[in-house]
């Protein structure tokens, strides 16, 4: 798994996690998995949406999230941990301020959205090579006209 309970220590204390989950690590794993999937959804290009072909960087999402330990991108780990904290906070707000958790979650989502839109470029993340599978013959927009109308008598 890309992040786990130990990674959440940068965003929430262990005793808070234990209070919220009653020591059930399955709930922690579920929150981590949900955060990872949400993060992936922001960074994965939609092949059916021509907007993704506008020249922005396309990130190799599987490569990013398959890394473990110190090979992981520290900012991605931090943002995913913040998102996982939010999923835990939905269960209970034991000994931390709900508004702070919500604010930080919103900032994490905003950051992923900006990366996905190309407003922020993370040069240290692996990128997809544009080829037939990522670009194809599609263009961001098309132009043309109708066929000429002709009165044939």
Image: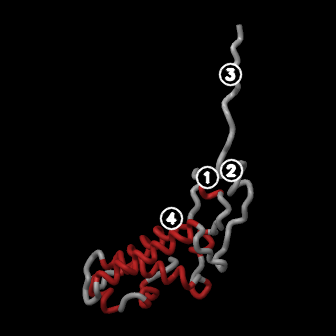
- Disc 4 target residue: 41
Disc 3 and disc 1: Cα gap in Å?
Answer: 30 Å
Q: Residue sitting at 44 percent across and 73 percent down?
A: 35
Q: Secondary structure at mark 2?
A: loop
In contact (CB < 8 Å): disc 2 and disc 1: yes
Quickly name the residue at label 3. 149
Secondary structure beneath dot 1 equals helix
Q: Earlier in the sequence, mark 2 or mark 3?
A: 2
Task: Decide: is 62 above or below 88.
Answer: above
Find residue 54 and report its horizontal and vertical position in percent.
65, 58
Horizontal and vertical percent position of residue 12: 37, 88
Q: Earlier in the sequence, mark 4 or mark 2?
A: 4
Residues at discs 4 and 3 in contact (Cβ within 8 Å): no
| Snapshot quadrant of residue 87 | bottom left
Q: CA distance from mark 4 to mark 2?
A: 23 Å
User: Mark number for residue 50?
Assistant: 1
Rendered image: mark on residue 139: 2
């Amino acid at each position: 798994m890309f992040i786990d309970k130990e990674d959440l220590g940068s965003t929430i204390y262990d005793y808070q996690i234990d209070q919220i989950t009653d020591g059930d690590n399955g709930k922690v794993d579920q929150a981590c998995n949900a955060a990872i999937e949400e993060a992936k959804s922001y960074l994965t290009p939609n092949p059916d949406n021509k907007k993704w072909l506008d020249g922005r960087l396309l990130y190799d999402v599987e490569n990013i999230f398959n890394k473990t330990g110190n090979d992981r991108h520290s900012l991605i780990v931090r943002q995913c941990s913040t998102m996982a904290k939010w999923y835990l906070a939905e269960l209970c707000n034991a000994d931390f301020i709900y508004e702070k958790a919500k604010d930080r979650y919103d900032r994490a989502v905003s950051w992923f959205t900006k990366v996905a839109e190309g407003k922020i470029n993370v040069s240290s993340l692996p990128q997809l090579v544009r080829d037939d599978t990522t670009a194809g013959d599609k263009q961001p927009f098309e132009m043309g006209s109708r066929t000429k109308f002709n009165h044939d008598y």
